Image (cartoon, grey):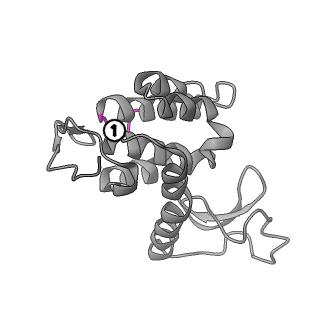
Amino acid sequence: MAGPIGSGTFNKNPGSVQNATTDRVDVNTLSLSPQGEAFIKEKEDKRLFAYNDNRHFCTEGYGHLIHGEHSCESEHIPNHRPISQATADQEFDTDKLRTQESCVRRHVEVPLYQREYDALCSLAFNIGDLHAKAPHLLQKLNNGQYSAAASEFLDITNHGTHGLVVRRKEEYEMFMHGNYDATNS
């Protein structure tokens, strides 16, 4: 079922992309769209310096773990060590290929629209391994229950954390309707 996504996208309003194609394609033929990348970057708290994230892992840029799951102190990295925008963008590109895109391709067995793929990549970027942290979503999706899978986004909120509730609603809207607007929060 592999095939091109076609010209299939058009802007209805700034920040919104609608997918005009009617055929889903093999997940292995997709890659994160520019709109999907912009959405993720808008949702992430970009910092052009090293810091310990909320799990105390040394992080920089768009949530890039500098040396895996270690603190800046344990890695002898000065807190607030600056990085460039180019470095943040390069790390994002590396992370998107290594983490979210490979995770989606590894666990999704059904064809997807571009908008569905982008929403799943955003989720994977935010929570990590979909298989471990969103098993019900994957089960429904791989059974071809696309709407039921989309509804699962709304339950992955770390017990109702406000920022995650907003992000999951936006990812749901992207998955279901192709709305890439990340400015609703």
Q: Position of residue 140 (x, y in %)?
A: 52, 27
Does 57 sit left or right of 43 as displayed?
right
Main SS of the magenta part reads: loop
Q: Residue at x 64, y 24 (%)?
A: 160
Q: Residue at x 47, y 73 (%)?
A: 90
**Foreground: 59 or 97?**
97
Q: Residue at x 81, y 78 (%)?
A: 76
Q: Which residues are magenta?
A: 178-185
Q: Position of residue 163 (x, y in %)?
A: 57, 34
> Which residue sits furthest front?
1
- One can see residue 137 in this view: yes
Q: Amino acid at mark 1?
A: Asp
Q: Which element is circle 1 on?
A: loop
- One can see residue 31 in this view: no
Q: Residue at x 49, y 27 (%)?
A: 149
Does 81 sit left or right of 91 as displayed?
right
Q: Position of residue 102 (x, y in %)?
A: 52, 58
Residue where numbered disc 1 is placed: 181
> Which residue sits furthest right?
74
Q: Is residue 83 magenta?
A: no
Q: How many marks?
A: 1
User: Looking at the image, is 91 positioned above or below residue 5?
Assistant: below
Query: Where is the C terminus found, in terms of image quarters?
Result: top left
User: Looking at the image, is 148 positioned above or below residue 104?
Assistant: above
Q: Position of residue 50 (x, y in %)?
A: 66, 68
User: Looking at the image, is 117 positioned above or below residue 98?
Assistant: above
